[in-house]
Amino acid sequence: MGSSAYISLENVVFSRSGRRIFDGISLDIPRGKVTAIMGPSGTGKTTLLKLIGGQLRPDSGSIRVDGHEVPRLKRTALYALRQKMGMLFQSGALFTDLSVFENVAFPIRVHTNLPEDMIRDIVLMKLEAVGLRGARDLMPSELSGGMTRRVALARSIALDPELIMYDEPFTGQDPIAMGVLVKLIRDLNSSMGLTSVLVSHDVTESLSICHFACIIADGKVIGQGTPEELRAHESERVQQFLQGQPDGPVPFHYPAEDATTDFGLGGKV
Amino acid sequence: MLDHVRALGRTGIDVVVSFGRSGQFLFGVLRGVPKPAVGFPLLVRQIYSVGVLSLAIVVVSGLFIGMVLGLQGYTILSDYGSESAIGQMIALTLVRELGPVVTALLFAGRAGSALTAEIGLMKATEQLSSMEMMGVDPLRRVISPRLWAGFYTMPVLALIFSVVGIWGGMLVGVEWLGVYDGSFWGNMQSSVEFVDDVLNGVIKSVVFGFVCAWIAVYQGYDCVPTSAGISSATTKTVVYSSLAVLGLDFVLTAVMFGNF
Ligand SMILES: Nc1ncnc2c1ncn2[C@@H]1O[C@H](COP(=O)(O)OP(=O)(O)O)[C@@H](O)[C@H]1O
Ligand SMILES: [Mg+2]
Protein backbone atom coordinates (compact mmCIF):
# COMPACT_ATOMS: atom_id res chain seq x y z
CA MET A 1 0.00 0.00 0.00
CA GLY A 2 2.66 2.44 1.14
CA SER A 3 1.82 6.05 0.45
CA SER A 4 -1.66 5.34 -0.83
CA ALA A 5 -2.84 4.14 2.59
CA TYR A 6 -5.56 6.37 3.98
CA ILE A 7 -5.59 4.69 7.36
CA SER A 8 -2.67 2.89 8.81
CA LEU A 9 -2.44 1.05 12.10
CA GLU A 10 0.87 -0.02 13.51
CA ASN A 11 1.35 -2.35 16.43
CA VAL A 12 -1.84 -1.27 18.09
CA VAL A 13 -2.39 -2.78 21.52
CA PHE A 14 -5.73 -2.29 23.21
CA SER A 15 -7.23 -3.88 26.31
CA ARG A 16 -10.65 -3.57 27.83
CA SER A 17 -11.67 -4.72 31.31
CA GLY A 18 -8.35 -6.51 31.60
CA ARG A 19 -8.89 -8.47 28.37
CA ARG A 20 -6.46 -7.83 25.56
CA ILE A 21 -8.53 -7.20 22.45
CA PHE A 22 -5.78 -6.14 20.07
CA ASP A 23 -2.33 -7.52 20.54
CA GLY A 24 -0.09 -5.55 18.23
CA ILE A 25 -2.32 -5.31 15.18
CA SER A 26 -0.95 -3.65 12.03
CA LEU A 27 -3.11 -2.84 9.06
CA ASP A 28 -3.20 -0.52 6.06
CA ILE A 29 -6.41 0.67 4.47
CA PRO A 30 -5.96 1.99 0.93
CA ARG A 31 -7.41 5.31 -0.22
CA GLY A 32 -10.49 5.25 -2.44
CA LYS A 33 -11.09 1.51 -2.14
CA VAL A 34 -13.56 -0.68 -0.29
CA THR A 35 -11.79 -2.60 2.43
CA ALA A 36 -13.56 -5.32 4.33
CA ILE A 37 -12.48 -6.25 7.82
CA MET A 38 -13.88 -9.60 8.77
CA GLY A 39 -13.70 -11.69 11.85
CA PRO A 40 -15.85 -13.69 14.22
CA SER A 41 -18.21 -11.80 16.52
CA GLY A 42 -16.51 -10.37 19.56
CA THR A 43 -13.06 -10.10 17.98
CA GLY A 44 -13.17 -6.33 18.25
CA LYS A 45 -14.32 -5.13 14.86
CA THR A 46 -16.50 -2.39 16.31
CA THR A 47 -13.70 -1.56 18.69
CA LEU A 48 -11.36 -1.17 15.74
CA LEU A 49 -13.68 1.39 14.12
CA LYS A 50 -13.92 3.29 17.39
CA LEU A 51 -10.14 3.37 17.62
CA ILE A 52 -9.95 4.77 14.10
CA GLY A 53 -12.58 7.39 14.95
CA GLY A 54 -10.70 8.37 18.10
CA GLN A 55 -13.53 7.39 20.45
CA LEU A 56 -11.17 4.97 22.16
CA ARG A 57 -7.46 5.37 22.72
CA PRO A 58 -5.04 2.47 22.24
CA ASP A 59 -2.70 1.43 25.05
CA SER A 60 0.17 1.73 22.60
CA GLY A 61 0.85 1.83 18.88
CA SER A 62 0.05 4.29 16.16
CA ILE A 63 -3.20 4.97 14.32
CA ARG A 64 -2.85 7.36 11.39
CA VAL A 65 -5.80 8.66 9.41
CA ASP A 66 -4.96 10.78 6.38
CA GLY A 67 -1.61 11.57 7.96
CA HIS A 68 -2.99 12.54 11.38
CA GLU A 69 -1.95 10.57 14.41
CA VAL A 70 -5.44 10.09 15.88
CA PRO A 71 -4.65 9.22 19.52
CA ARG A 72 -2.49 12.33 19.84
CA LEU A 73 -4.93 14.81 18.33
CA LYS A 74 -6.28 17.58 20.52
CA ARG A 75 -10.04 17.67 20.95
CA THR A 76 -10.66 20.40 18.37
CA ALA A 77 -8.45 18.76 15.77
CA LEU A 78 -10.08 15.41 16.40
CA TYR A 79 -13.55 16.89 15.97
CA ALA A 80 -12.42 18.57 12.77
CA LEU A 81 -11.01 15.29 11.46
CA ARG A 82 -14.28 13.53 12.27
CA GLN A 83 -16.10 15.82 9.88
CA LYS A 84 -14.22 13.99 7.15
CA MET A 85 -15.41 10.65 8.46
CA GLY A 86 -18.82 9.11 8.25
CA MET A 87 -19.76 6.16 10.37
CA LEU A 88 -22.73 3.92 9.95
CA PHE A 89 -23.48 2.39 13.34
CA GLN A 90 -24.74 -1.13 13.68
CA SER A 91 -28.10 0.09 14.96
CA GLY A 92 -28.29 3.13 12.70
CA ALA A 93 -28.32 5.40 15.77
CA LEU A 94 -30.80 7.88 14.34
CA PHE A 95 -31.85 10.68 16.68
CA THR A 96 -35.24 9.48 17.80
CA ASP A 97 -36.62 12.95 18.51
CA LEU A 98 -35.93 14.20 14.97
CA SER A 99 -37.65 13.33 11.70
CA VAL A 100 -35.82 11.60 8.87
CA PHE A 101 -35.27 14.95 7.17
CA GLU A 102 -33.91 16.60 10.32
CA ASN A 103 -31.67 13.61 11.03
CA VAL A 104 -29.95 13.99 7.67
CA ALA A 105 -29.89 17.77 8.03
CA PHE A 106 -28.33 17.57 11.50
CA PRO A 107 -24.63 17.44 10.55
CA ILE A 108 -25.17 20.09 7.86
CA ARG A 109 -26.84 22.46 10.27
CA VAL A 110 -24.17 21.93 12.89
CA HIS A 111 -21.13 22.32 10.68
CA THR A 112 -22.16 24.79 8.00
CA ASN A 113 -24.02 28.06 7.72
CA LEU A 114 -25.87 27.17 4.55
CA PRO A 115 -29.25 28.79 3.90
CA GLU A 116 -32.33 26.69 4.54
CA ASP A 117 -33.23 26.07 0.87
CA MET A 118 -29.75 24.77 0.16
CA ILE A 119 -29.87 22.45 3.17
CA ARG A 120 -33.18 21.18 1.85
CA ASP A 121 -31.65 20.43 -1.55
CA ILE A 122 -28.69 18.59 -0.06
CA VAL A 123 -30.84 16.54 2.28
CA LEU A 124 -33.24 15.53 -0.48
CA MET A 125 -30.31 14.64 -2.72
CA LYS A 126 -28.81 12.39 -0.05
CA LEU A 127 -32.17 10.80 0.67
CA GLU A 128 -32.67 10.29 -3.06
CA ALA A 129 -29.32 8.49 -3.17
CA VAL A 130 -30.59 5.92 -0.66
CA GLY A 131 -34.04 5.79 -2.26
CA LEU A 132 -35.92 7.35 0.66
CA ARG A 133 -36.76 10.85 -0.53
CA GLY A 134 -40.42 10.02 0.04
CA ALA A 135 -39.81 9.08 3.68
CA ARG A 136 -38.50 12.48 4.71
CA ASP A 137 -41.35 13.29 7.08
CA LEU A 138 -41.40 9.97 8.92
CA MET A 139 -40.05 9.62 12.42
CA PRO A 140 -37.35 7.00 13.10
CA SER A 141 -39.84 4.86 15.03
CA GLU A 142 -41.88 4.49 11.83
CA LEU A 143 -39.02 2.99 9.81
CA SER A 144 -38.10 -0.64 9.24
CA GLY A 145 -34.62 -1.84 10.12
CA GLY A 146 -33.41 -1.65 6.53
CA MET A 147 -34.82 1.85 6.06
CA THR A 148 -33.27 3.01 9.32
CA ARG A 149 -29.88 1.95 8.13
CA ARG A 150 -30.33 3.67 4.78
CA VAL A 151 -31.37 6.93 6.46
CA ALA A 152 -28.34 6.61 8.72
CA LEU A 153 -26.24 6.11 5.60
CA ALA A 154 -27.70 9.26 4.05
CA ARG A 155 -26.87 11.12 7.24
CA SER A 156 -23.29 9.88 7.33
CA ILE A 157 -22.66 11.07 3.77
CA ALA A 158 -24.42 14.41 4.30
CA LEU A 159 -21.17 16.33 4.56
CA ASP A 160 -19.48 14.44 1.72
CA PRO A 161 -16.86 12.70 3.88
CA GLU A 162 -13.63 11.21 2.58
CA LEU A 163 -13.99 8.09 4.65
CA ILE A 164 -16.99 6.05 5.54
CA MET A 165 -17.03 3.20 8.01
CA TYR A 166 -19.81 0.63 8.01
CA ASP A 167 -20.36 -1.44 11.12
CA GLU A 168 -22.05 -4.74 10.22
CA PRO A 169 -24.24 -3.19 7.53
CA PHE A 170 -25.74 -6.52 6.47
CA THR A 171 -26.76 -7.95 9.83
CA GLY A 172 -30.49 -8.48 10.11
CA GLN A 173 -31.28 -7.38 6.58
CA ASP A 174 -33.63 -9.24 4.31
CA PRO A 175 -32.16 -10.30 0.93
CA ILE A 176 -33.62 -7.32 -0.95
CA ALA A 177 -32.46 -4.74 1.59
CA MET A 178 -29.10 -6.47 1.55
CA GLY A 179 -28.88 -6.18 -2.23
CA VAL A 180 -29.80 -2.50 -2.03
CA LEU A 181 -27.12 -1.87 0.57
CA VAL A 182 -24.45 -3.74 -1.35
CA LYS A 183 -25.22 -1.67 -4.42
CA LEU A 184 -25.24 1.56 -2.40
CA ILE A 185 -21.90 0.89 -0.82
CA ARG A 186 -20.33 0.13 -4.15
CA ASP A 187 -21.94 3.12 -5.89
CA LEU A 188 -20.90 5.53 -3.18
CA ASN A 189 -17.39 4.28 -3.44
CA SER A 190 -17.16 4.60 -7.20
CA SER A 191 -19.12 7.82 -7.66
CA MET A 192 -17.71 9.80 -4.77
CA GLY A 193 -14.29 8.17 -4.52
CA LEU A 194 -14.90 7.43 -0.86
CA THR A 195 -12.52 5.34 1.12
CA SER A 196 -14.80 2.71 2.59
CA VAL A 197 -14.18 0.43 5.51
CA LEU A 198 -16.63 -2.32 5.99
CA VAL A 199 -16.70 -4.39 9.11
CA SER A 200 -18.64 -7.61 8.95
CA HIS A 201 -18.77 -11.27 9.79
CA ASP A 202 -20.69 -11.83 6.58
CA VAL A 203 -18.11 -13.44 4.31
CA THR A 204 -19.98 -13.81 1.01
CA GLU A 205 -21.42 -10.31 0.88
CA SER A 206 -18.24 -8.65 2.06
CA LEU A 207 -16.00 -10.44 -0.38
CA SER A 208 -18.40 -9.67 -3.20
CA ILE A 209 -18.00 -5.89 -2.86
CA CYS A 210 -14.57 -5.26 -1.42
CA HIS A 211 -11.35 -4.57 -3.29
CA PHE A 212 -9.31 -5.67 -0.37
CA ALA A 213 -10.08 -7.70 2.71
CA CYS A 214 -8.48 -8.66 5.93
CA ILE A 215 -9.43 -11.18 8.55
CA ILE A 216 -8.76 -10.57 12.21
CA ALA A 217 -8.88 -13.09 15.02
CA ASP A 218 -7.32 -13.20 18.47
CA GLY A 219 -6.26 -9.57 18.26
CA LYS A 220 -4.18 -10.03 15.13
CA VAL A 221 -4.53 -9.97 11.38
CA ILE A 222 -4.51 -13.60 10.28
CA GLY A 223 -4.82 -13.02 6.57
CA GLN A 224 -5.21 -10.19 4.10
CA GLY A 225 -5.28 -9.51 0.39
CA THR A 226 -7.72 -9.23 -2.46
CA PRO A 227 -10.75 -11.53 -2.30
CA GLU A 228 -9.06 -13.90 -4.80
CA GLU A 229 -5.87 -13.98 -2.78
CA LEU A 230 -7.80 -14.74 0.37
CA ARG A 231 -9.78 -17.54 -1.21
CA ALA A 232 -6.50 -19.10 -2.26
CA HIS A 233 -4.87 -18.45 1.11
CA GLU A 234 -2.98 -21.45 2.46
CA SER A 235 -3.63 -20.72 6.15
CA GLU A 236 -5.99 -23.17 7.78
CA ARG A 237 -7.51 -20.50 9.99
CA VAL A 238 -8.37 -18.27 7.04
CA GLN A 239 -10.01 -21.18 5.25
CA GLN A 240 -11.92 -22.16 8.37
CA PHE A 241 -13.33 -18.64 8.63
CA LEU A 242 -14.13 -18.23 4.95
CA GLN A 243 -15.91 -21.55 4.76
CA GLY A 244 -17.70 -21.06 8.04
CA GLN A 245 -16.60 -24.29 9.70
CA PRO A 246 -17.75 -24.25 13.31
CA ASP A 247 -14.48 -25.26 14.93
CA GLY A 248 -10.89 -25.39 13.97
CA PRO A 249 -7.84 -23.31 14.74
CA VAL A 250 -10.17 -20.37 15.51
CA PRO A 251 -12.02 -21.49 18.63
CA PHE A 252 -15.79 -21.33 18.73
CA HIS A 253 -15.72 -20.97 22.52
CA TYR A 254 -14.97 -17.82 24.48
CA PRO A 255 -11.94 -18.63 26.66
CA ALA A 256 -13.18 -20.65 29.67
CA GLU A 257 -11.86 -23.07 32.20
CA ASP A 258 -11.92 -26.73 31.37
CA ALA A 259 -15.49 -27.96 30.88
CA THR A 260 -15.17 -30.99 33.17
CA THR A 261 -14.17 -28.82 36.15
CA ASP A 262 -16.69 -26.12 35.26
CA PHE A 263 -19.60 -28.57 35.25
CA GLY A 264 -18.34 -30.11 38.48
CA LEU A 265 -17.42 -33.44 36.89
CA GLY A 266 -13.78 -33.27 37.81
CA GLY A 267 -13.91 -35.94 40.52
CA LYS A 268 -11.68 -34.27 43.07
CA VAL A 269 -13.03 -31.06 44.61
CA MET B 1 -13.22 -11.66 57.40
CA LEU B 2 -10.50 -10.56 55.04
CA ASP B 3 -13.02 -10.78 52.23
CA HIS B 4 -15.31 -8.35 54.01
CA VAL B 5 -12.48 -5.89 54.55
CA ARG B 6 -11.57 -6.26 50.92
CA ALA B 7 -15.16 -5.71 49.80
CA LEU B 8 -15.39 -2.64 52.00
CA GLY B 9 -12.18 -1.26 50.52
CA ARG B 10 -13.42 -1.94 47.02
CA THR B 11 -16.71 -0.18 47.69
CA GLY B 12 -14.80 2.75 49.16
CA ILE B 13 -12.60 2.98 46.09
CA ASP B 14 -15.62 2.72 43.79
CA VAL B 15 -17.35 5.57 45.60
CA VAL B 16 -14.27 7.79 45.38
CA VAL B 17 -13.81 6.91 41.72
CA SER B 18 -17.40 7.73 40.84
CA PHE B 19 -17.18 11.05 42.69
CA GLY B 20 -14.03 11.82 40.73
CA ARG B 21 -15.64 10.80 37.46
CA SER B 22 -18.76 12.85 38.05
CA GLY B 23 -16.58 15.85 38.94
CA GLN B 24 -14.58 15.43 35.76
CA PHE B 25 -17.82 15.06 33.85
CA LEU B 26 -19.19 18.26 35.39
CA PHE B 27 -16.03 20.10 34.45
CA GLY B 28 -16.36 18.91 30.87
CA VAL B 29 -19.96 20.08 30.72
CA LEU B 30 -19.33 23.49 32.27
CA ARG B 31 -16.31 24.14 30.09
CA GLY B 32 -18.18 23.55 26.86
CA VAL B 33 -20.47 26.53 26.55
CA PRO B 34 -22.27 26.27 23.20
CA LYS B 35 -22.59 29.24 20.88
CA PRO B 36 -25.61 31.29 21.99
CA ALA B 37 -27.33 30.95 18.61
CA VAL B 38 -27.16 27.15 18.90
CA GLY B 39 -27.39 26.81 22.65
CA PHE B 40 -30.30 29.10 23.36
CA PRO B 41 -33.01 27.20 21.47
CA LEU B 42 -31.75 23.93 23.00
CA LEU B 43 -31.92 25.49 26.45
CA VAL B 44 -35.42 26.81 25.88
CA ARG B 45 -36.57 23.36 24.81
CA GLN B 46 -35.13 21.77 27.93
CA ILE B 47 -36.58 24.46 30.17
CA TYR B 48 -39.89 23.56 28.64
CA SER B 49 -39.56 19.80 29.19
CA VAL B 50 -37.86 20.03 32.58
CA GLY B 51 -39.65 23.07 33.96
CA VAL B 52 -42.94 23.75 32.28
CA LEU B 53 -43.96 20.11 32.24
CA SER B 54 -43.22 19.88 35.98
CA LEU B 55 -45.55 22.80 36.72
CA ALA B 56 -48.68 20.70 37.16
CA ILE B 57 -47.27 18.44 39.84
CA VAL B 58 -45.60 21.37 41.60
CA VAL B 59 -48.78 23.47 41.65
CA VAL B 60 -51.00 20.63 42.83
CA SER B 61 -48.55 19.54 45.54
CA GLY B 62 -48.05 23.13 46.65
CA LEU B 63 -51.78 23.66 46.96
CA PHE B 64 -52.34 20.56 49.07
CA ILE B 65 -49.33 21.10 51.29
CA GLY B 66 -50.44 24.69 51.90
CA MET B 67 -53.94 23.52 52.79
CA VAL B 68 -52.60 20.86 55.16
CA LEU B 69 -50.36 23.46 56.79
CA GLY B 70 -53.40 25.67 57.22
CA LEU B 71 -55.35 22.93 58.95
CA GLN B 72 -52.53 21.74 61.17
CA GLY B 73 -51.40 25.25 61.98
CA TYR B 74 -54.90 26.29 62.95
CA THR B 75 -55.36 23.25 65.21
CA ILE B 76 -52.09 23.83 67.03
CA LEU B 77 -52.18 27.63 67.21
CA SER B 78 -55.82 27.89 68.26
CA ASP B 79 -54.91 26.00 71.49
CA TYR B 80 -52.92 29.09 72.41
CA GLY B 81 -55.45 31.47 71.01
CA SER B 82 -52.97 32.71 68.47
CA GLU B 83 -54.50 31.39 65.26
CA SER B 84 -53.95 34.79 63.69
CA ALA B 85 -50.24 33.88 63.46
CA ILE B 86 -51.14 31.17 60.98
CA GLY B 87 -50.23 33.31 57.96
CA GLN B 88 -46.76 33.89 59.30
CA MET B 89 -46.27 30.20 60.13
CA ILE B 90 -47.37 28.98 56.70
CA ALA B 91 -45.30 31.50 54.81
CA LEU B 92 -42.10 30.92 56.78
CA THR B 93 -42.39 27.13 56.61
CA LEU B 94 -42.95 27.22 52.88
CA VAL B 95 -40.43 29.83 51.89
CA ARG B 96 -37.62 28.59 54.12
CA GLU B 97 -38.04 24.82 53.96
CA LEU B 98 -40.91 23.09 52.26
CA GLY B 99 -40.82 25.12 49.05
CA PRO B 100 -37.22 24.34 48.12
CA VAL B 101 -37.11 20.82 49.60
CA VAL B 102 -40.41 19.40 48.39
CA THR B 103 -39.98 20.98 44.97
CA ALA B 104 -36.54 19.40 44.69
CA LEU B 105 -37.91 15.99 45.69
CA LEU B 106 -40.72 16.32 43.15
CA PHE B 107 -38.24 17.52 40.56
CA ALA B 108 -36.03 14.46 41.14
CA GLY B 109 -38.97 12.14 40.68
CA ARG B 110 -40.59 13.92 37.75
CA ALA B 111 -37.80 15.53 35.74
CA GLY B 112 -34.59 13.92 37.03
CA SER B 113 -35.71 10.39 36.33
CA ALA B 114 -36.86 11.40 32.86
CA LEU B 115 -33.51 13.06 32.12
CA THR B 116 -31.59 9.97 33.21
CA ALA B 117 -33.76 7.61 31.20
CA GLU B 118 -33.60 9.80 28.10
CA ILE B 119 -29.84 10.20 28.16
CA GLY B 120 -29.33 6.54 29.05
CA LEU B 121 -31.43 5.46 26.12
CA MET B 122 -29.56 7.80 23.81
CA LYS B 123 -26.38 6.13 25.00
CA ALA B 124 -27.75 2.60 24.59
CA THR B 125 -28.93 3.31 21.05
CA GLU B 126 -25.51 4.77 20.15
CA GLN B 127 -26.97 8.23 19.52
CA LEU B 128 -24.32 9.82 21.71
CA SER B 129 -21.54 7.89 19.97
CA SER B 130 -22.82 8.80 16.55
CA MET B 131 -23.01 12.44 17.57
CA GLU B 132 -19.38 12.25 18.62
CA MET B 133 -18.48 10.70 15.30
CA MET B 134 -20.22 13.58 13.53
CA GLY B 135 -17.87 15.94 15.28
CA VAL B 136 -20.49 17.15 17.74
CA ASP B 137 -19.69 17.01 21.43
CA PRO B 138 -22.63 15.40 23.25
CA LEU B 139 -21.56 17.09 26.48
CA ARG B 140 -22.30 20.44 24.90
CA ARG B 141 -25.18 19.49 22.75
CA VAL B 142 -27.12 17.09 24.96
CA ILE B 143 -25.91 17.36 28.52
CA SER B 144 -25.18 21.04 29.02
CA PRO B 145 -28.65 22.41 28.12
CA ARG B 146 -30.28 19.84 30.40
CA LEU B 147 -28.03 20.70 33.31
CA TRP B 148 -28.62 24.44 32.96
CA ALA B 149 -32.33 23.96 32.51
CA GLY B 150 -32.47 22.23 35.90
CA PHE B 151 -30.40 25.01 37.42
CA TYR B 152 -32.65 27.79 36.11
CA THR B 153 -36.03 26.21 36.60
CA MET B 154 -35.74 24.90 40.15
CA PRO B 155 -35.81 28.31 41.93
CA VAL B 156 -38.76 29.40 39.82
CA LEU B 157 -40.62 26.16 40.53
CA ALA B 158 -39.87 26.48 44.25
CA LEU B 159 -41.22 30.05 44.33
CA ILE B 160 -44.35 28.98 42.49
CA PHE B 161 -44.73 26.15 44.99
CA SER B 162 -44.50 28.57 47.91
CA VAL B 163 -46.91 31.07 46.40
CA VAL B 164 -49.51 28.41 45.62
CA GLY B 165 -48.97 26.91 49.08
CA ILE B 166 -49.60 30.24 50.78
CA TRP B 167 -52.74 30.67 48.73
CA GLY B 168 -53.87 27.15 49.74
CA GLY B 169 -53.20 27.97 53.40
CA MET B 170 -55.23 31.14 52.99
CA LEU B 171 -58.11 29.17 51.51
CA VAL B 172 -58.24 26.89 54.54
CA GLY B 173 -57.32 29.40 57.23
CA VAL B 174 -59.24 32.47 56.11
CA GLU B 175 -62.02 31.27 53.85
CA TRP B 176 -62.88 28.07 55.67
CA LEU B 177 -61.81 28.37 59.32
CA GLY B 178 -62.50 32.08 59.52
CA VAL B 179 -59.17 33.62 60.58
CA TYR B 180 -59.37 37.40 60.09
CA ASP B 181 -57.66 38.05 56.77
CA GLY B 182 -56.12 41.34 57.88
CA SER B 183 -54.10 39.58 60.55
CA PHE B 184 -53.35 36.64 58.24
CA TRP B 185 -51.63 38.86 55.69
CA GLY B 186 -50.40 41.48 58.15
CA ASN B 187 -48.54 38.99 60.35
CA MET B 188 -47.04 37.46 57.26
CA GLN B 189 -45.83 40.77 55.90
CA SER B 190 -44.26 41.88 59.16
CA SER B 191 -42.40 38.63 59.81
CA VAL B 192 -41.14 37.41 56.42
CA GLU B 193 -37.86 39.13 55.57
CA PHE B 194 -36.76 39.30 51.97
CA VAL B 195 -33.07 38.56 52.49
CA ASP B 196 -33.28 36.22 55.48
CA ASP B 197 -36.18 34.14 54.30
CA VAL B 198 -37.00 34.52 50.63
CA LEU B 199 -33.46 34.91 49.36
CA ASN B 200 -32.14 32.08 51.52
CA GLY B 201 -34.91 29.87 50.20
CA VAL B 202 -33.99 30.79 46.64
CA ILE B 203 -30.34 30.02 47.34
CA LYS B 204 -31.34 26.62 48.65
CA SER B 205 -33.35 25.83 45.56
CA VAL B 206 -30.55 26.99 43.27
CA VAL B 207 -28.22 24.55 45.01
CA PHE B 208 -30.80 21.75 44.89
CA GLY B 209 -31.54 22.43 41.23
CA PHE B 210 -27.90 22.19 40.34
CA VAL B 211 -27.28 19.03 42.35
CA CYS B 212 -30.42 17.24 41.13
CA ALA B 213 -29.73 18.07 37.49
CA TRP B 214 -26.08 17.06 37.86
CA ILE B 215 -26.96 13.70 39.39
CA ALA B 216 -29.61 13.06 36.74
CA VAL B 217 -27.46 13.80 33.70
CA TYR B 218 -24.43 12.07 35.15
CA GLN B 219 -26.37 8.90 35.94
CA GLY B 220 -27.74 8.88 32.41
CA TYR B 221 -24.40 9.53 30.77
CA ASP B 222 -22.56 6.99 32.90
CA CYS B 223 -25.15 4.20 32.87
CA VAL B 224 -24.55 0.68 31.63
CA PRO B 225 -26.16 0.89 28.18
CA THR B 226 -28.69 -1.90 28.61
CA SER B 227 -32.30 -1.91 29.77
CA ALA B 228 -31.31 -3.14 33.22
CA GLY B 229 -28.57 -0.50 33.37
CA ILE B 230 -30.94 2.31 32.47
CA SER B 231 -33.53 1.25 35.00
CA SER B 232 -30.97 1.04 37.77
CA ALA B 233 -29.55 4.45 36.78
CA THR B 234 -33.04 5.96 36.95
CA THR B 235 -33.58 4.54 40.41
CA LYS B 236 -30.21 5.83 41.53
CA THR B 237 -31.08 9.31 40.27
CA VAL B 238 -34.17 9.48 42.44
CA VAL B 239 -32.52 7.95 45.51
CA TYR B 240 -29.29 9.94 45.35
CA SER B 241 -31.06 13.21 44.53
CA SER B 242 -33.47 12.81 47.43
CA LEU B 243 -30.69 11.98 49.88
CA ALA B 244 -28.52 14.80 48.60
CA VAL B 245 -31.36 17.30 48.89
CA LEU B 246 -32.24 16.31 52.44
CA GLY B 247 -28.61 16.24 53.55
CA LEU B 248 -27.75 19.52 51.90
CA ASP B 249 -30.88 21.09 53.32
CA PHE B 250 -29.66 20.36 56.83
CA VAL B 251 -26.24 21.82 56.08
CA LEU B 252 -27.64 24.93 54.41
CA THR B 253 -30.20 25.47 57.16
CA ALA B 254 -27.48 25.21 59.78
CA VAL B 255 -25.39 27.77 57.92
CA MET B 256 -28.25 30.17 57.16
CA PHE B 257 -30.36 30.04 60.30
CA GLY B 258 -27.95 28.54 62.81
CA ASN B 259 -26.46 31.72 64.36
CA PHE B 260 -28.29 31.52 67.66
N1 LIG C 1 -17.89 -1.26 26.79
C1 LIG C 1 -17.18 -2.38 26.89
N2 LIG C 1 -16.55 -2.69 28.04
C2 LIG C 1 -15.81 -3.81 28.15
N3 LIG C 1 -15.64 -4.70 27.18
C3 LIG C 1 -16.23 -4.46 25.99
C4 LIG C 1 -17.03 -3.30 25.78
N4 LIG C 1 -17.49 -3.31 24.51
C5 LIG C 1 -17.00 -4.44 23.97
N5 LIG C 1 -16.24 -5.13 24.85
C6 LIG C 1 -15.52 -6.38 24.58
O1 LIG C 1 -14.67 -6.15 23.51
C7 LIG C 1 -14.65 -7.26 22.63
C8 LIG C 1 -14.83 -6.77 21.22
O2 LIG C 1 -16.10 -6.19 21.07
P1 LIG C 1 -16.60 -5.64 19.67
O3 LIG C 1 -15.59 -4.70 19.13
O4 LIG C 1 -17.97 -5.10 19.89
O5 LIG C 1 -16.65 -6.96 18.81
P2 LIG C 1 -17.28 -7.18 17.34
O6 LIG C 1 -17.78 -5.86 16.86
O7 LIG C 1 -16.17 -7.75 16.54
O8 LIG C 1 -18.37 -8.19 17.50
C9 LIG C 1 -15.76 -8.19 23.07
O9 LIG C 1 -15.12 -9.36 23.58
C10 LIG C 1 -16.48 -7.48 24.17
O10 LIG C 1 -16.70 -8.38 25.22
MG1 LIG D 1 -19.63 -5.17 16.49
Image: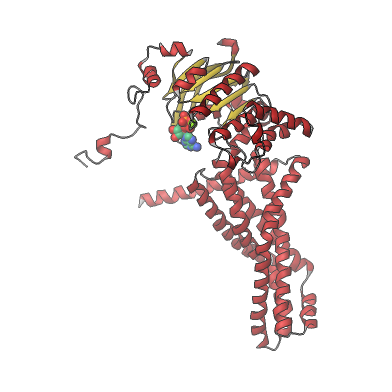
| Residue A70 visible from this viewpoint | yes
Image coordinates of residue B99 in percent, x first then y, are 68, 66
In front of the other: B18 or B121: B121
In front of the other: A213 or B160: A213
Q: Is residue B114 above or below residue A231?
A: below
Image coordinates of residue A216 in percent, x first then y, are 45, 22
In the image, taking residue B180 as reference, residue A94 lies left or right, namely left
Q: Residue at x 62, y 65 (%)?
A: B250
Q: Residue at x 75, y 66 (%)?
A: B198
Name which quarter of the figure residue B184 lies in. bottom right
Q: How many marks?
A: 0
**If the image is split into quadrants, where does the N terminus of chain A sit?**
top right
Q: Residue at x 64, y 45 (%)?
A: B26
**If the image is split into quadrants, where does the C terminus of chain A sit?**
top left
Name which quarter of the figure residue B205 lies in. bottom right
Image coordinates of residue B34 in percent, x first then y, are 73, 40
Q: Is residue A216 above or below residue B5?
A: above
Image coordinates of residue A177 in percent, x first then y, are 53, 29
Q: Residue at x 64, y 84 (%)?
A: B75
Q: Is residue A77 above or below residue B176?
A: above
| Residue A77 visible from this viewpoint | no
In front of the other: A142 or B117: A142
In the image, taking residue B234 as reference, residue B203 lies left or right, namely right
Colour setting: secondary structure
